[in-house]
Amino acid sequence: MRQKETMLNTLLKENKVTMSKLSDDEIGNDHVSANIETPLRDDAFEMSDTKKIEKIEFHFKEIMHTLGLDLTDDSLKGTPNRVAKMYIQEIFSGLNPDNKPKIALFENKYQYDQMLVEKDISFYSNCEHHFVPIFGKAHIAYISSGTVIGLSKLNRIVQYFAKRPQVQERLTEQVFHALEYILGTDNIAVVIDAKHYCVAARGVEDTGSSTVTSKLGGAFKNDPTTRAEFMSIVNK
Ligand SMILES: [Zn+2]
């Protein structure tokens, strides 16, 4: 599953810098990541969700208190619990493999052997370096090797991996490799076009830019006609 030549490796090679020479702040602000697996500890799911919500609520209350906020205020007092529930049950629910979407595959009865493109899949994720939103669109394509997947499932796979603290390159890789595994083919293409709140609202404060990442496999990578057809559909 691991990519030998990640975007970062290429980057590092070209710039002749090594990760160890970058400070944690620089790594965070430049949103580099070296690993396609989300860095989780082995004991990540030993604690129950209920207990996690309790703990996050406690610590988030501390953060708000430290900021000087009055937690007896009617509008604020429920916030720590709301944030904790939102983290565990919604925006970071994709960390837990129990929440992986159930995927049913179907036989390719129509013998459709051309590319299938699912465009403009909206998603919301969160930057793992700043814990603020990344949001945008994913475009996915595959050429069936004999099985097909329900269209809504393509959507669910994107949502599952988006609901983690993320970097966009890893999200792209994770969606790609999940589809490669599920569909049993490397004729897969994933393009993600997203805005990063941490770039728009802080740091360089650039509201106009968006980040595009892509991962192309099989014919999408090697056959110029297939790639051109996919790109023209995505850019339409
Ligand atoms: Zn960020």
Image: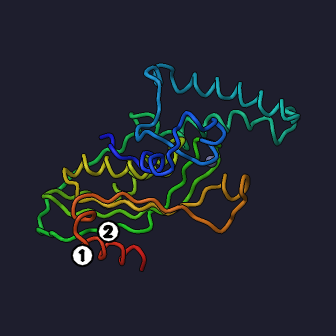
State the image coordinates of residue 131 (x, y, percent, origin top left).
Answer: 63, 43
State the image coordinates of residue 89 (x, y, percent, origin top left).
Answer: 54, 38
For residue 52, above or below residue 235: above
Q: CA distance from mark 1 to mark 2?
A: 15 Å
Judge depth for marks 1 and 2 and give the one in front. Answer: 1
Image quadrant in which you'd find residue 53: top right
Q: Which residue is drawn at the image coordinates 72% and 34% (left, top)?
A: 80
State the image coordinates of residue 45 (x, y, percent, origin top left).
Answer: 46, 24
Q: Amino acid at mark 2?
A: Val
For residue 52, above or below residue 202: above
State the image coordinates of residue 141 (x, y, percent, origin top left).
Answer: 31, 64
* 230 sits to left or right of 144: right
Nearest to N terminus: mark 1 or mark 2: 2
Q: Name the one closer to the observer, 169 or 154.
A: 169
**Taking the image as drawn, is residue 170 in sight?**
no
User: Pointer 2: residues within 10 angstroms few (<14), some, or many (20+)?
Assistant: some
Q: Which residue is drawn at the image coordinates 58% and 36% (left, top)?
A: 21
* Mark sitting on residue 225: 1
Q: Amino acid at mark 1?
A: Thr
Q: Name the one closer to the observer, 170 or 54.
A: 170
* 176 sits to left or right of 13: left
Please state, as top left, top right, bottom left or bottom right, where the C terminus lies in the image. Answer: bottom left
Q: Name the one closer to the observer, 28 or 56.
A: 28
User: Pointer 1: residues within 10 angstroms few (<14), some, or many (20+)?
Assistant: few
Q: What secondary structure is marked by label 1?
A: helix
